[in-house]
């Protein structure tokens, strides 16, 4: 009988410990419920309610739609915990597949085959629904400082996994600011795109043999790369932020050297 109070204390301690280390148990439950609902929809035999369809015959040749792009963001929040709260509150209507904290810890928040709400109103080439075609990765960074080496190392490992798993082309690793130049600037001019390109994630330039032709149309070249050029000033800033970060805040024109960079990227696209 004397041991009974000690048993209660032990159970209380275990309960407190479990709650402290599972702060998102409730939202994980919501995730599982929603995933189950979508799974039940997929299992259903389609109803022939679309004229002139008269019969349902199930094909044997299909699989899941797969992502073809990776969009990289910075969180613009103060910590990973702030981002987790944002992504687990229904009212925010924003999410991502992965969050990488400054210490390199990787958190997977959504099955890669499901559609996260990270891109918003965005466009790349002819793709106007980037959420449906991409995986979103958020890096814990306020957009005003350099990214931590541990964070970039973890990102590279993750990107390598995604590239091989989904056969994502080199050119399709891009930033939020690239696909939404008039709205977004992430992952900021501090992001090491050249380092990533050396590992095969995203394009980089080589201007050694590039000559700018007479009458070169920079906006047309940007469209070929994939940029939405409706806001030409924002698009040029986005291009500079990605490929010429040292000059990303100085004007919206491209000098001769910057045009060579654009031509090199266009030729690789």
Image (cartoon, rainbow, N blue to C red):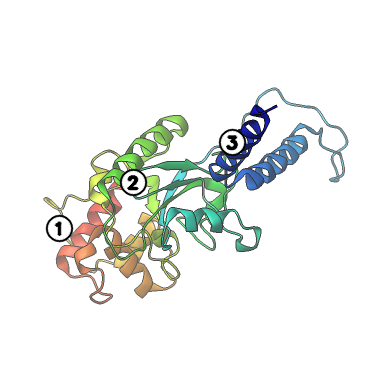
Residue 8 to residue 238: above or below = above
Q: Is residue 214 visible?
A: no
Q: Residues within 10 Å of mark 2 (few under 14, many from 20)?
A: few
Q: Residue furthest front?
A: 2
Q: Residue furthest bottom?
A: 251
Residue 181 location, quadrant: bottom left
| Residue 204 screen position, x and y as percent | 24, 49
Q: Earlier in the sequence, mark 3 or mark 2?
A: 3
Q: Nearer the viewer, residue 197 or 55?
A: 197
Q: Secondary structure at mark 2?
A: loop
Q: Secondary structure at mark 3?
A: helix
Q: Which residue is mark 1?
A: 211
| Residue 93 screen position, x and y as percent | 61, 60
Q: Is residue 64 left or right of residue 99?
A: right
Q: Nearer the viewer, residue 251 or 9?
A: 9
Q: Which residue is mark 3?
A: 14
Q: Which residue is mark 2?
A: 103
Q: Is residue 95 left or right of residue 100?
A: right
Q: Earlier in the sequence, mark 1 or mark 3?
A: 3
Residue 36 location, quadrant: top right
How far apart are the alpha carbons under marks 1 and 3?
69 Å
Q: Earlier in the sequence, mark 1 or mark 2?
A: 2
Residue 94 to residue 29: above or below = below
Q: Residue at x 72, y 26 (%)?
A: 59
Q: Residue at x 72, y 35 (%)?
A: 39
């Amino acid at each position: 009988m004397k041991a009974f109070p000690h048993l209660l204390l032990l159970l209380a301690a275990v309960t407190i410990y479990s709650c402290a280390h599972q702060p998102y148990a409730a939202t994980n439950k919501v995730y599982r419920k929603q995933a189950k609902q979508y799974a039940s929809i997929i299992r259903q035999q389609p109803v022939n309610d679309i004229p002139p369809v008269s019969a349902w015959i199930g094909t044997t040749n299909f699989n899941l739609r797969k992502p073809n792009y990776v969009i990289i963001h910075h969180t613009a929040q103060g910590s990973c915990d702030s981002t987790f709260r944002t992504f687990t509150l229904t009212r925010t209507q924003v999410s991502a597949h992965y969050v990488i904290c400054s210490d390199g810890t990787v958190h997977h928040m959504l099955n890669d085959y499901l559609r996260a709400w990270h891109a918003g109103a965005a466009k790349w080439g002819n793709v106007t629904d980037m959420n449906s075609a991409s995986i979103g990765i958020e890096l814990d960074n306020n957009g005003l400082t350099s990214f931590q080496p541990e964070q970039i190392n973890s990102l590279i490992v993750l990107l390598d996994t995604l590239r091989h798993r989904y056969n994502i082309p080199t050119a399709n690793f891009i930033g939020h600011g690239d696909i939404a130049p008039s709205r977004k600037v992430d992952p900021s001019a501090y992001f090491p795109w050249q380092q990533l390109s050396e590992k095969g994630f995203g394009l980089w330039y080589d201007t050694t043999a590039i000559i700018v032709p007479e009458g070169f149309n920079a906006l047309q070249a940007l469209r070929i790369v994939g940029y939405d050029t409706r806001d030409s000033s924002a698009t040029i800033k986005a291009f500079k932020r990605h490929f010429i970060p040292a000059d990303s805040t100085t004007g919206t024109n491209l000098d001769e050297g910057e045009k060579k960079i654009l031509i090199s990227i266009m030729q690789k696209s």
